[in-house]
Image (cartoon, rainbow, N blue to C red):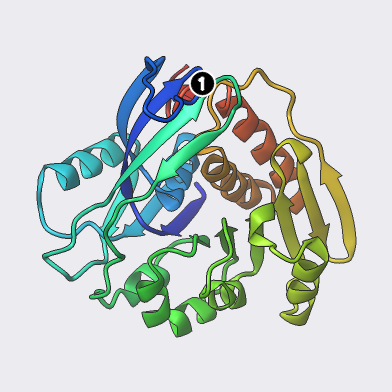
Amino acid sequence: MSQALFIGRSVLDVTALVQDFPVPDGKVKALANDVMPGGSALNAAVTFSHLGGRAALATSLGAPNLMRDFLISDLSRRNVTVHDICDDPEYGIPFSTVISTRSLGARMIVNGAGDECEKIHQRNDLISADAQLIQIDQYERHFVAKHFDALQAFEGPIVLDGGSWKEWSPDFLRLADIPIVSEVFCPDGQRTFAAMCAELKISRWAITKGHGGVVWHDQGNEGQIPALSVDVVDTLGAGDIFHGAFCHAYLESGSFVDALSQANRIAGESCTHAGTRSWMDA
């Protein structure tokens, strides 16, 4: 059974699926509502486990409370092992408010007001455990900074889930063997990102472009995978699901391009359902 460690922030998503965004001062009726654990690494870990892998999640949970219990219980049902890396009893799991539209296949996200946990446990044991692959997602940066040397020494591949460009993105990119980033991660375009990867001697990378599919580079070879043509209901978490599916397929097959293709298909299918979980239970 393939095993992977996912490192990243966990949140609680308060979601609403609507037909169209409300106008200012307007109201609309939701087509669906939910409250569920979320976050890039968390959703990827759940996907990895759903596909048959053994997933562990290193994330900040903070003080015991109902929200923490809810998150741990949910992930236990999804067979994801959770490791709390936060050493701050004042830290609380942040809320994220998400409104998704069926008409546009777009969403608005309001992230929680709190900052990341800065008081971090030393957990080199997580990195030196049985994981064959590690995914990082530009969050839990204090944990990543504290364990930078251990991550550099990790013998398996480190996959970067790069959303938007951040001031600390170069540090995460230096750790990555396989960066898979969104097109908004590349503010100066694909050519600049390719040059950055070449400078860091990264030979495998991909850029996800939504309706434009996936552009990939694999040890000098290049190509593009077209987006799956589906009846989009909700795109929430599609990128996270893509990464979890990629990590599982890559460990199973060892083929970079085949793994991207499988991830592209699974992420596309997830968009035909509301939320981040209902595609798994359909």
Asked whether residue 267 appears in the rendered view, the answer is yes
Task: Identify which residue is drawn at 73% across, 56% down.
Answer: 206
Residue 10: x percent and y percent? Answer: 33, 52
Residue 44: x percent and y percent? Answer: 48, 46
Choose top left, top right, bottom left or bottom right for residue 197. Answer: bottom right
Indicate left or right for 111 with 71 as reference: right
The foreground one among 281 and 90 is 90
Instruction: Give the residue type at disc 1.
Output: Asp
Task: Identify which residue is drawn at 65% across, 17% down.
Answer: 231
Indicate left or right for 196 with 158 as reference: right
Farthest residue, direction front: 25
**Image height of 252 relative to 233, above or below:** below
Farthest residue, direction bottom: 149
The foreground one among 136 and 29 is 29
The foreground one among 125 and 67 is 67
Choose top left, top right, bottom left or bottom right for residue 150. Answer: bottom left
Q: Secondary structure at mark 1?
A: loop
Asked whether residue 52 appears in the rendered view, the answer is no
According to the picture, the residue beneath numbered tag 1 turns out to be: 20
Residue 245: x percent and y percent? Answer: 58, 42
Residue 280: x percent and y percent? Answer: 47, 25
